[in-house]
Amino acid sequence: EAWDTGRYLRYMPGALEEIRAQFGPELHILHDVHHRLTPREAAEFAKEVEPVRLFWLEDPTPVDDQEALKLLRQHSTVPIAIGEV
């Protein structure tokens, strides 16, 4: 199965909202993006999932792209986990 960024960006926010609705505010929801988004896509995604109150969003962009992380921080308050690679 080929990766489809558009499909992911359309599907995942709703899926994360359903998880939050099903399990409530006490569940720590962690989501790993696996470096698959461009900086703009990562910022858009993070902003869209803010109401879900993720515990963290992992590796939305490559860790070595500090400008991408700066852009992401400017557009979203979602906690970011990075750097395991």
Image (cartoon, helix red, strand yellow):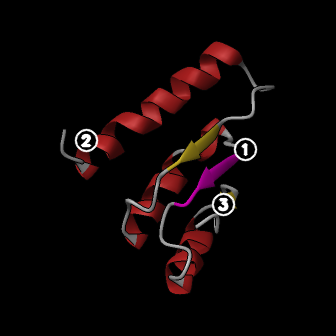
Q: Which mark is residue 7?
A: 2
Disc nearer the start of the sequence (3/1) = 1
> Residue 75 lies in what quarter of the image?
bottom right
Q: Assess whether mark 2 and mark 3 are in contact (beta carbons under 8 angstroms).
A: no
Number of dots carrying numbers:
3
Mark 3 residue element: strand
Q: Residue furthest top?
A: 22
Mark 2 residue element: helix
Residue type beneath disc 1: Phe
Q: Which residue is mark 1?
A: 55
Quadrant including the C terminus: bottom right
- The percent position of residue 52, horizontal first and vertical second, equals 62, 36
Residue type beneath disc 2: Arg
- In the image, the segment drawn in magenta is 55-59
Q: Residue at x 72, y 19 (%)?
A: 24
- The percent position of residue 63, horizontal first and vertical second, equals 56, 74
Q: Is residue 83 above or below residue 60?
A: below
The residues tagged by marks 2 and 1 sit, at their Cα atoms, a distance apart of 23 Å
The residues tagged by marks 3 and 1 sit, at their Cα atoms, a distance apart of 9 Å
Q: Which residue is mark 3?
A: 80
> Residue 72 lies in what quarter of the image?
bottom right
- The percent position of residue 44, horizontal first and vertical second, equals 44, 59
Mark 1 residue element: loop
The residues tagged by marks 3 and 2 sit, at their Cα atoms, a distance apart of 22 Å
Q: Residue at x 38, y 62 (%)?
A: 37
Q: Residue at x 50, y 60 (%)?
A: 60
Disc nearer the start of the sequence (2/1) = 2
Q: Assess whether mark 1 and mark 3 are in contact (beta carbons under 8 angstroms).
A: no
